[in-house]
Amino acid sequence: MFKMIPELNNASVRMRDRGQVETIISNMQRAGASTLQVISDFDMTLTRFAHKGKRCPTTHNILHNTTLISEECKAKMSDLVAYYYPIEIDSLKSVEEKIPHMEEWWTQAHALLIKQRIRKDQLAQAVRASGAMLREGYSSFFDMLKENSVPLLIFSAGVGDILEEVIIGHGVFSSNVRVFSNYMDYDKDGFACAFKGELIHTFNKREGALQNIHQFVHDRTNVLLLGDSLGDLDMADGVQDLKNILRIGYLNDKVEERREAYVSSYDIVLEEDETLDVPNAILNYITAGEGSQKHEETRVETPHCQKRHLPKETRLQTPHCQKHYLPEETRKCSSAKGTPASQPLAKQE
Ligand SMILES: Nc1ccn([C@@H]2O[C@H](COP(=O)(O)O)[C@@H](O)[C@H]2O)c(=O)n1
């Protein structure tokens, strides 16, 4: 197996139990691509953590490089990151201890963003100008999933509207991709005025997965899960009759301190690896196997509460229909106007 997937011998790769990884991948390969779905986190999992020695922005912080938000808002958002991010990744604190802090962080950040009166039709251009980057190998990743009709569920605690613009901008948003995230709501003039639905933060994804069980693709019982936080481990808990799951975790920061926890929780840990080489090699092996045959495009069916005016190829389903707990003034606004089609970003690869 490791001969077939030499990337598993890369220096960035750690595994608790190589034999178990081999068994899971073999089972998935025998079952074929038609039984597979990929469930992935977004920020710092599909996007880069760092590039040329500089931290890359999360979807919450992408607008820092633009004029859509004020200098005061940027400074306050940066202060929030400086205070709460060390708590998020603190290996000495339990998840229970972290949750109230995460709720505070997201609630304050969302309230700040809503006050900026961000216009929906300015987002695509702003995200393009921000230099947001998917990990190296992203086009092979998205193309392989699309060609093999493998659903990709992106389960993100980031900002859904911005996340979509990043993948649209990279030209890889197709009908097998579905996003579950924090979406903004817009007033009749197209200004962001609230966040919709239940708040998703780093450590309540399991809750979200279980509450939204109907969002998952049920006849696909093999899951490749990609995450960067211990909060991502349970993202597949809504999948019924799960047969095989391979969890791949990106360990981006505080590597020494967090290695043990990651290696004991994820099947494969990728340390300071800015590429999708390992997931791509595994997907290539699974989809090239006898159990797989290429299909015509299959659409992922999910309930839909936010129709977007994207090109047909990029139209997706988003689940959030309710408003979550923001201050009163940020919870009231009427329905969105359409989003114009976006121009693709220049490819990085
Ligand atoms: N105001 C905020 C809130 C969160 N973040 C970071 O974004 C990440 C989003 O979560 P994913 O599930 O998509 O990884 C999270 O890990 C926070 O570090 C932020 O930058 N600003």
Image (spheres, rainbow, N blue to C red):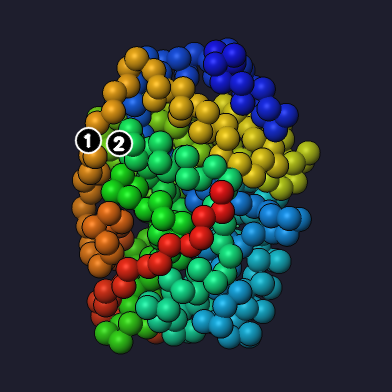
| Residue 127 badge | none
Query: What's the amino acid at mark 2?
Result: Ser
Q: Residue at x 22, y 35 (%)?
A: 296
Query: What's the amino acid at mark 1?
Result: Glu
Depth order, front residue of 315/247: 315
| Residue 296 badge | 1
Q: Residue furthest right?
A: 256
Q: Residue at x 33, y 36 (%)?
A: 147
Left-right relation of 9 to 229? right
Q: Is residue 137 above or below residue 168?
A: above
Cβ at disc 2 under 8 Å from ligand 1: no
- Spatial CA distance of label 1 from label 2 is 7 Å
Q: Is residue 310 above or below residue 282?
A: below
Give the position of the N terminus as an image quadrant: top right
Tell me the SS state at disc 1. loop
Does the rendering let one see residue 326?
no
Depth order, front residue of 317/102: 317
Q: Position of residue 65 (x, y in %)?
A: 61, 74
Q: Residue at x 32, y 17 (%)?
A: 291
**Which callout, 1 or 2, points at the residue further toward the start of the chain?**
2
Q: Is residue 313 above or below residue 182?
A: above
Tell me the SS state at disc 2. loop
| Residue 149 badge | 2
Label 2 Cα neighbours within 10 Å, binned few <14 / some 14-19 / many ≥20: many
Labelled pair 1, 2 in contact (Cβ < 8 Å): yes
The image shows a total of numbered marks equal to: 2
Dividing the picture into quadrants, the one containing residue 122 is bottom left
Q: Position of residue 81 (x, y in %)?
A: 66, 66
Does the rendering let one see residue 288?
yes
Depth order, front residue of 315/82: 315
Q: Position of residue 197 (x, y in %)?
A: 34, 63
